[in-house]
Image (cartoon, rainbow, N blue to C red):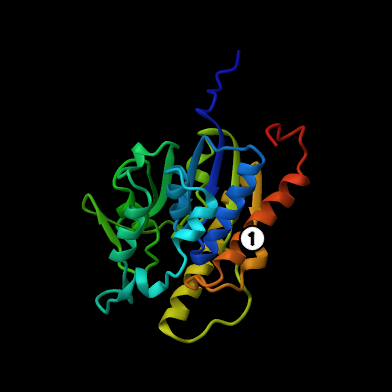
Amino acid sequence: MSNTVKPKYRIGVALSGGGARGFAHAGALKALDEAGIKPDVIAGVSAGSVISVMYAAGMKPDEMIQSFNGIKFSSLARINGRGSLFEINRFGKFISDHVKPYKNLEELPIPTYIGVTDFDEGLPAEFHEGDISRIVTASCSIPIVFNPIKIDGTRYVDGGVLHNLPAWILRDKCEYLIGINCSPLLTDKAGSSMMDIAIRTFHLMAKANQAEDMALCDIAVELRDIAHYNIFNLKDIRKVFISGYAAMRHTMKRLDHSKIPFV
């Protein structure tokens, strides 16, 4: 008799970080919705955490895109100059406004996990309870670009520093795991500004740590064609959305249905 414990959930979805490229996640979720595939649990890092909480709160993928219409990076962040380039308190309020009436992760209709990095201990961490806006802001706080976010006395930064794809959070919690990576690395030379160097460094860290998490997934989708989009450029989110939608539809068409029975 097997002592294996059956996972709590059937289908889980893990969404990577990637800045504005994260709207590809919304497109991928739309493709899953149209195929009748609904995640029983969802996890996100950085941009993936934004899409995760919005989806779990009941927003449709197309509504996510509409919520960012006319929004500029400067509307969500402002120059800081004290310990980081920008502060993103405005971003936290934006998140709060778009997941109402939910305030805490444990209240969301779909169980949701957010990947972060414990900056003080240098360890990966996750939240599935607590203030949504503060935790999502922490998960999006790229070091140097943004300040660490303190939660219960501990400083947290972007989950992508150690695990840009939160498959590690969900692997033992679901029977089937779909991972979507919207953060491929360009081989182009980076600029020489402080922002360029910080972002390039962060991308290199993400590249180094996400392969292992991709391998944990039953279905792994990597969106290479969106690599050239700037992570802070919100003008092209519709194009990114369409790329995510197309990639997920293509992936589902070529899957071995005998091994992945829910597609």
Say which element carries label 1: helix
Q: Quadrant of residue 82?
A: bottom left
Q: Which residue is nearer to you in this view: 148 or 47?
A: 47
Q: Which residue is nearer to you in this view: 53 or 213?
A: 53
In which quadrant is the N terminus drawn? top right
| Residue 176 position in % (x across, y down) | 61, 36
On the question of residue 247 being in view, the answer is yes
Q: Quick check: 259 above or below 184? A: above
Q: Which residue is mark 1?
A: 242
Residue under the image location 64 percent in, 37 percent down: 36
In the picture, measured across the screen, residue 119 lies left or right of residue 217, that is left
On the question of residue 144 being in view, the answer is no
Please rate how many residues cluster around mark 1, counting C-alpha atoms within 10 Å: few if below 14, some from 14 to 19, many from 20: some
| Residue 173 position in % (x across, y down) | 50, 33
Amino acid marked by disc 1: Ile
Residue under the image location 50 percent in, 49 percent down: 166
| Residue 4 position in % (x across, y down) | 56, 22
Residue under the image location 60 percent in, 69 percent down: 185
In which quadrant is the C terminus drawn? top right
